[in-house]
Amino acid sequence: MIRIIEAKDYKDMSRKAANIISAQIILKPNCVLGLATGSSPIGTYDQLVEWYEKGDLDFSGVSSVNLDEYRGLDRENDQSYYYFMHKNLFDRVNIDPARTNVPDGTEPDAEKECARYEALIDSMGGVDLQLLGLGHNGHIGFNEPAPVFPKTTHCVDLTESTIEANKRFFASADDVPKQAYTMGIGTIMKAKKILLVVSGADKADIVAKAFFGEVTPEVPASILQMHGDVTLVADEAALSKIPR
Ligand code: F6R
């Protein structure tokens, strides 16, 4: 069952999502947050930073694990997800950097890095609240449409549509990394709670398909229909095609 919270616009979506994350931190100050990159959560992070600056939020006990990272990009690369997280959240609040985790894109041994990351999440006691964005093809993390749902953290070949969508951040499509390390669908489904943020008319079709259509690995996010505690916070435009 998916709980849907309708927001007016991106700002309102970000505020509502930040409220849910904030409640999680207040209820369990030593919680494990699963975090995402992309344009969808930036406003949420900005709102959390604002509340932190006001003294309303304390990240000192919080740990985090990010969904994914490009394979081959190092931490200093301004397109790495490590860099993104520091710029948009970690460097702006009092989270302990030693307790923040992003897959290591520079580890050339994919199997080793993915096994390490999966074991790390387990050793932390699992994710309390996983924040997700939604790709136009229904991907979550970098779990692209496929014949089966990938279970654990793994190395993926990015699809043309994802490379196309992400090239705006690089000098050209040729510069976009072709692979990434990502939590698997099984890893994501193990999170106790899931919070999805989706905004914009360009996501309206995939929102309807993923949450009101058939559960299939060809639409990876559709599996969330089987999770017991999912909250979708989306703006009016993104919800414009769901059955009412
Ligand atoms: C980001 C991630 C991706 C994005 C998705 C939506 O860590 O794993 O699944 O959440 O591509 O991206 P935006 O928010 O830029 O539309």
Image (spheres, helix red, strand yellow):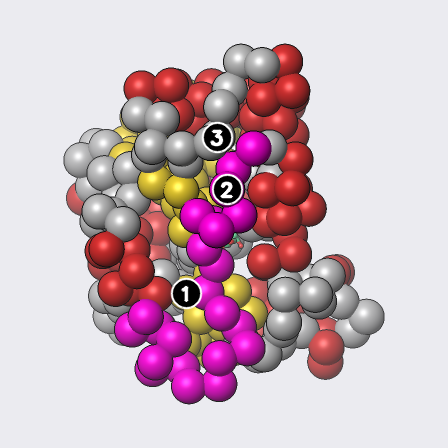
**Residue 175 in the image, given as x and y percentages of width and height:** 72, 77
Judged left or right of residue 22, residue 128 is left
Q: Quadrant of the N terminus?
A: top left
Q: Quadrant of the C terminus?
A: top left
Which label sits in the foreground, 1 or 3? 3
Is 82 situated above or below 64? below
Magenta residues, as a range?
Answer: 94-116
**Residue 7 in the image, given as x and y percentages of width and height:** 52, 20
Residue at image point 78% right, 73% down: 172
Viewer-proximal residue among 123 and 146: 123
Residue at image point 70% right, 65% down: 76
Which label sits in the foreground, 2 or 1? 2
Mark 3 sits on what residue?
59
**Residue 200 in the image, given as x and y percentages of width and height:** 60, 36
Label annotation for residue 182:
1
Query: What's the amino acid at mark 3?
Result: Phe
Quote the CA–CA distance across marks 2 and 1: 23 Å
Q: Secondary structure at mark 2?
A: loop
Q: Secondary structure at mark 3?
A: loop
